[in-house]
Amino acid sequence: MNEASPETRQHHALEFPSSMRESQRLRLATLVRLRWLSVAGQVTTCIAVAWGLGWSFPVLPCFALIATSAGLNLYLASRYSGSFRLSSTAALAVLTFDILQPTGLLMLTGGIQNPFIVFLIVPALIAPATQPPLTVIAITSFAVAATTLLAVVHLPLPWSEVGGVMLPGGYVAALWFAIVTTLLFAAVYLYRIAAESRALADALSATELVLQREQHLSALDGLAAAAAHELGTPLSTIALVAKEMKRSLPKDQPTPDDITLLVEQSERCRLILRRLTSLSATNETHLANLSLLALIDEVAEPHRNFGVELDVEVVEREGEEPMARRNAAVIYGIGNIVENAVDFAQSAVLIRTGWTNTTVWVEVLDDGPGFPPAQLSRIGDPYMPRRDYRDHRNAGGLGLGLFIAMTLLQRSGATVKIANRPKKGAIAAVVWPRPVYSASMSSG
């Protein structure tokens, strides 16, 4: 199979600038505010237990640890601006301190038997929502190690009676298991949710960029018409003056070369503008009256001559053929589906279309390997590597193609379904209610 041209394959090389990832870094100001809240809670608790309830525990060491946390907050707030974002290494150091400091407090006040042990989970929940996998693993592992240490090394729990209270060993073991399980489950769960949210946000940004580019290309026709119109009048004046200068010379006197050149070049410019105006007028008519079959032909044409037979078949005609204005989103969406079919077809791709008085539909069928059944439910997810759901021939890519196509088409009011054919290959069906199709195309 021949390789596709760069113009028809360029979206597979779409990359995101590093600045987009900058917004996903954890803001230092967020951690500073959370730590101030933690400091206030720790101070309140220590005062209430030591002087409110009168229970005995190492008050001064506890306040020393709280002062350490407050001092770090003051240092960070004075050194960095509120908009400063942490690198993964810096976030690891800050979150590690946020586990270490409460671990010290809990070790002085009952260890794992202290009910405030649950606050040890908080830093471990922040990491998976904002940090890369290695940082998440490190923070979660450190939180598990701290929990294990607190289960075996700690001072007695402050209590009203001398000697405090001793929980059964089996209960302490169950408590340790519950906390560790919560840490691990929350880390995995939050990381997956956050990763999917980030991928979806980036993919939607890519979709908007693609649509904006297509709309800008469509707007070039109007720009060409405006340029031709604005330049026509002054160019006509230049041509008229040049001809008058030429006629004003005596007939028996040779015409200066400069005047002859000026006349020739002005005529050449007028011819260029005439062609430009003609092309723009043709395109304006095409844009104003784009039929469904013209849309299909426009989508199919760039994907011919790639070693795969590409046919268009109209299988249902009820009423007049749908006519609408060009919509860059719809054209790009269907084109992307056709491109995907051509990429993986063995010998042929068929585009079937039709319309009734109530619906407009397009189907794209190929004779390729189809989709693995386990991957069918994930089709259209952003950043799903192409090798995950077809064969190895076009592996790589960001997996944005079908996501962008389905998003653009669904925004136009279409229902998109992708499935395997009964014997071989895949089928993608795009269906609009006819009034929605005309409205969405006109609004594009």
Image (spheres, rainbow, N blue to C red):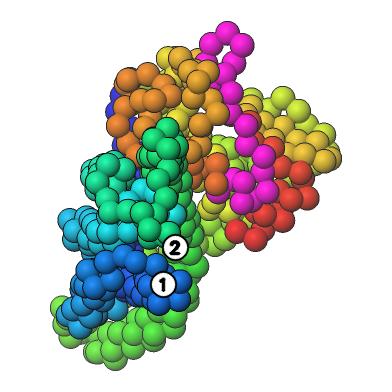
Foreground of the two, 380 or 113 = 113
Residue topped by disc 1: 54
Q: CA distance from mark 1 to mark 2?
A: 8 Å
Report the residue at 78% width, 50% height from top.
435
User: Residue at 31% across / 27% down in the picture?
Assistant: 395
Q: Which residues are magenta?
A: 408-427
Sort mark 1 into few (<14), some (14-19) or many (20+) by Cα contacts within 10 Å.
Answer: few
Q: Are marks 1 and 2 in contact (CB under 8 Å)?
A: yes
Residue at image coords 50%, 37%: 380
Q: Amino acid at mark 1?
A: Gly
Residue 284 lies left or right of residue 155; in this view the side is: right
Kind of residue sitting beneath label 2: Ser
Labels 1 and 2: the sequence-earlier one? 1
Seen from this angle, which residue lies furthest top? 423
Query: How dense is the environment of label 2, judged by Cα within 10 Å: few (below 14), some, or many (20 and up)?
Result: few
Q: Which residue is mark 2?
A: 160
Query: Viewed as shown, does residue 330 lie left or right of 303?
Result: right
Q: Position of residue 274 (x, y in %)?
A: 44, 66
